[in-house]
Image (cartoon, rainbow, N blue to C red):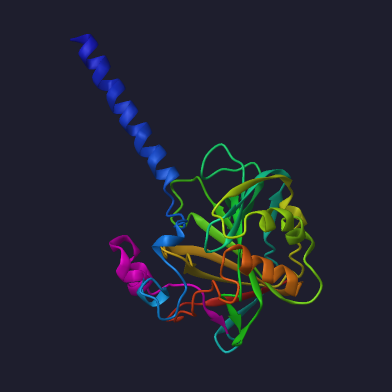
Amino acid sequence: MKNQIKCFSISWSLLFMLILLHATSTFAQEVEDEREFDYGERSEKGPRRWGELKEEWAACKNGDMQSPIDMSNQRVKMIRRSRELKMNYKPCNATVKNRGHDIMLQWAGDTETESEAGSIQINGTEYFLRQAHWHSPSEHTINGRRYDVELHMVHVSPDTNVKNNIAVTGLLYKFGKADAFLSKLTGNMASMIDRMEERNAGVMDPREIKTGGKNYYRYMGSLTVPPCTEGVIWTMNKKVRTVSREQVKLLRHAVHDYAEKNARPLQPLNSRDVHLYKP
């Protein structure tokens, strides 16, 4: 009888551990298989149809906190107090991957939520940097202006008590001088054109991604690809960086969308607040 009780206890312990592992390994991450969706305006798998393709993608159609949005001066509330984004990044091994719909750089980590590349802190919660990827043209706009490239740095909190466990920092780019960080991926991108493959990028330091100014927008939104999960904390840097035309061509050519875009259309702001933080 004691052995039965002991086995029963162990079984419940294992079940509890499996539930925790499942919770931390399925943090509503982006869909990576490009065959499941695309960006064609008239496509049966395009953005206007995402919410109809799968039941678990319903938020893409029915959600009221969707991203991207236009950050218009008329709708932005300015916060004039110091609340700088606390970043604690460090060099870490990374993999560059052609996901078919974008190029992604993924940093190594012990779990899907914690990585060795460091983290950011938002309102006392630590979010670990998992990956970065590029959209062209930009998904977010400022006062209606769409830029040439947008970089998303995706962070995840392993704290199961945190309601909003995904935080994305975004950077906008216009044509100009080549971006030094993106240049480091040129060789890998060129070697996987039209191939959904991945390459070892070696040690990549996220601190080399130059963010610039201390002014940034913040609002509550969603992932910009299926499953369009809501509750994502968005932080968009107001300073616009530069990227060369050749780099943008390679980004598009690598994912065999040379003349197309991989940017989701703007979504309604609805009743959400957008804050502009200025020191």
The residue segment tinted magenta is: 50-71
Whether residue 89 sits left or right of residue 140 in the image: it is right
Quadrant that contains the C terminus = bottom right
Q: Based on the displayed image, in which of its 4 quarters is residue 7 positioned?
A: top left
Residue at image x 33%, y 33%?
16
Q: Is residue 167 magenta?
A: no
Q: Position of residue 132 (x, y in %)?
A: 61, 57
Q: Position of residue 33 (x, y in %)?
A: 45, 56
Report if residue 241 is visible in the image.
Answer: no
Whether residue 208 sits left or right of residue 75 in the image: it is right
Whether residue 44 sits left or right of residue 214 in the image: it is left
Quadrant that contains the N terminus = top left
Report if residue 96 is visible in the image.
Answer: yes
Q: Position of residue 234 (x, y in %)?
A: 55, 66
In the picture as drawn, the residue positioned furthest to the bottom comes out as 74
In the picture as drawn, the residue positioned furthest to the left comes out as 1
Q: Position of residue 194 (x, y in %)?
A: 57, 60
Whether residue 235 sits left or right of residue 54 in the image: it is right
Residue at image x 42%, y 61%?
35
Q: Is residue 59 above or below residue 143?
A: above
Q: Is residue 6 above or below residue 106?
A: above
* Residue closer to the observer: 78 or 51: 51
